[in-house]
Amino acid sequence: MRFTKMQGIGNDYLLINCFEEYVPDPSRLAVEMCREHVGVGADGIVLLEPGESSPFAMRIFNRDGSEAEMCGNAARCIGKFVYERGMTADTAFSLDTKSGIRALQLQVQDGRVESVTVDMGTPVLNPSEIPVDLPGQMVLRHRLQVLGQMWFITCVSMGNPHCVIFVRDPEVLDLNSIGPAFEHYSLFPRRTNVEFVRVISRDVLQMRVWERGTGETLACGTGACAALVAAVLCGHADRKVQMKLAGGNLMLNWNAEDNHVYQTGPAAFVFDCEWLG
């Protein structure tokens, strides 16, 4: 089976073109392929498939085999792949995902996709829809004790659940301990992604992320969007920011006119290969 390893600011995925390949058990394959040392190593696998409402569809499986609803970095990788591999000549098209249709706009120079803007949709704030087992219309700076420490959480869904926490310095945190404690906390019936965010200025934020089903990654596109929404709601930031992540930077815009969050960033090929498993 042929596949392509790609990365969006360090969030790396094994992309399988299911226009040409067949994957009978993607959950099992994700665990086998993403395992380091005995596999390829990656944050997950991405299946590129024909869409029902769009020309293309995307399915994402995390390193542990669980299926994710949406990933902005993977969506940008899809955009670069289908354009540069000659599957479309369009620089604007839609993509079917588990969390709905997402619009992609490619910025192309000399036949190469330099960056991709993804319409990440409208943030969901109602706890029952995120989901979070808390009452009310919004989870904003809710006090939560985890590992003997008090944290203030703000919860957002960008098609998948996120728990955003503002901290002085995310670099000093032991995410290998803290991340799983939040991911599996009883308030989150479908587990959660966790973002630890530092406010540098009203238009610059820094973030570390613990991804549900994967662990700490160098970047998370939906998490960055959720962090922007939380920062605006908490009064920390304006609607347009640069988000600094370990793997690189994203430009984010929570548009006041349509209430959609737009994410712009690069994507890159790593290598093409053949899986013999």
Image (cartoon, helix red, strand yellow):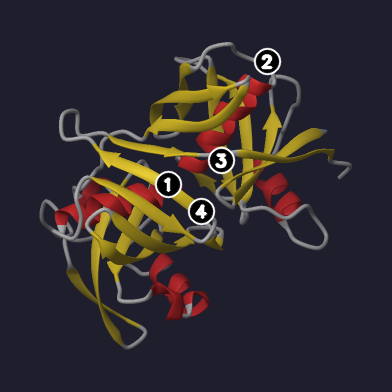
Q: Dot 2 surroundings within 10 Å: few (below 14), some, or many (20 or more)?
A: few
Q: Amino acid at mark 3?
A: Ile
How far separated are the C-alphas under marks 2 and 3?
22 Å
Q: Which residue corresponds to the image point at 18% horizontal and 48% vertical from the top-left?
A: 126
**Residue that mark 4 sits on:** 248
- 137 sits to left or right of 119: left
Question: Are the residues flagged by discs 3 and 4 in contact, CB closer than 8 Å?
Answer: no
Vertical placement of residue 145 versus 128, above or below: below
Q: Quadrant of the C terminus?
A: top right
Which callout, 2 or 3, points at the residue further toward the start of the chain? 3
Residue 215 in view here = yes
Q: Amino acid at mark 4?
A: Gly
Q: Quadrant of the N terminus?
A: top right
How far separated are the C-alphas under marks 1 and 2?
26 Å
**Residue that mark 3 sits on:** 60
How far separated are the C-alphas under marks 4 and 2?
27 Å
- Relative image position of residue 195 (x, y in whole percent): 38, 62
How far separated are the C-alphas under marks 3 and 4?
21 Å
